[in-house]
Image (spheres, rainbow, N blue to C red):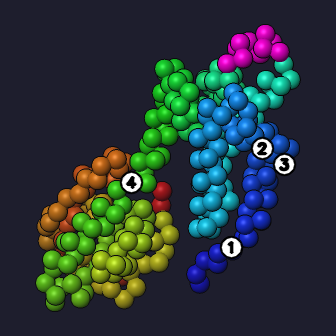
Amino acid sequence: MGTKYVIVSPWEYLWQQTLLTHPLAAPIWIAGLWFLLRDPLGKKYAVLAWTYFTVLSEMLILHGKIYYLAPAYVTLLAAGSVWIELRLFRESECGCGGDSRAIIARRCDCGSAIDAHPSGRSYGSLYAFLGCAGDSRGKRAAGRFAATLRDMFGWPEQVHAVAGVYQALPESERDQAVVLAYNYGEASAIDYFGAKLGLPRAMSGHNQYGLWGPGAMTGQVAVAIGFTEQQLRQFYDEVTPEASVSPPYAMPEESRLTIFVCRRPKKTLQESWALWKYLS
């Protein structure tokens, strides 16, 4: 049975954002939006608020999951704390001379909160924006944030490279060929981008893909990405490197990949599938 997805209305999505951060915290991040958009001290950082509204709009249109916006609230909670601190305490008490940038940095606590908080990537990006990245911990957080973004790059290039190898197969082989991906990221990219390029659905032993299995395809010919030659030689007598792909900005493990064509299987995929499967 397929997974059943529930699409909530825009109002439900907005309401659940308050539940995501806790209703008692919602007034703080709403104050943060006010501070960034309306307060003279906060307007210089208005891009943070407009970025939030842009991503929120995208999530409403594309029916994104409720928690996709979670990292943004770290920034907004910090901005709301600034607004509250500026309004409730005298400048001498807040210890920053009324410098909103200094207060935001302080609210974010350029230190251990980055390492402890699961949304530390947002802190790191904010520190860099505010000029706090000179702190060694800020640099580490910014690095983690960059790595997360990099995991969103390179997938179309991978799929185009796989499609090039697949389409270059003789027609007699192409009809029976399968596309094997080492992990679910590569497999999902093939499923998402590959249909327009004439690719069949991907097969992978990784996580839920492993549960779906090879179906009726025996794997007499396979186009494989993400594997090493040694891994593939456990299953095929003939493993030929045909192309390589190294997309800019991609994660290191998704760069410098070789695309192999595999022939002469030692066993059918049905017989060997238990050995392809793994969880991580």
Of labels 3 and 4, earlier in sequence is 3
Q: Nearer the viewer, residue 200 or 53?
A: 53
Mark drawn on residue 30:
2
Residue 129 position in % (x across, y down): 53, 31
| Structural distance between the alpha carbons of marks 3 and 2 | 11 Å
Left or right of 202, for residue 111: right
Kind of residue at disc 1: Ile
* Marks 3 and 4 in Cβ contact (< 8 Å): no
For label 3, the residue is: 23
Dot 1 lies on which element?
loop
Q: Nearer the viewer, mark 4 or mark 2?
A: 2
Residue 91, magenta (yes or no): yes
Of labels 3 and 2, earlier in sequence is 3
Kind of residue at disc 3: Pro
Of labels 4 and 1, earlier in sequence is 1
Mark drawn on residue 7:
1
Dot 4 lies on which element?
loop
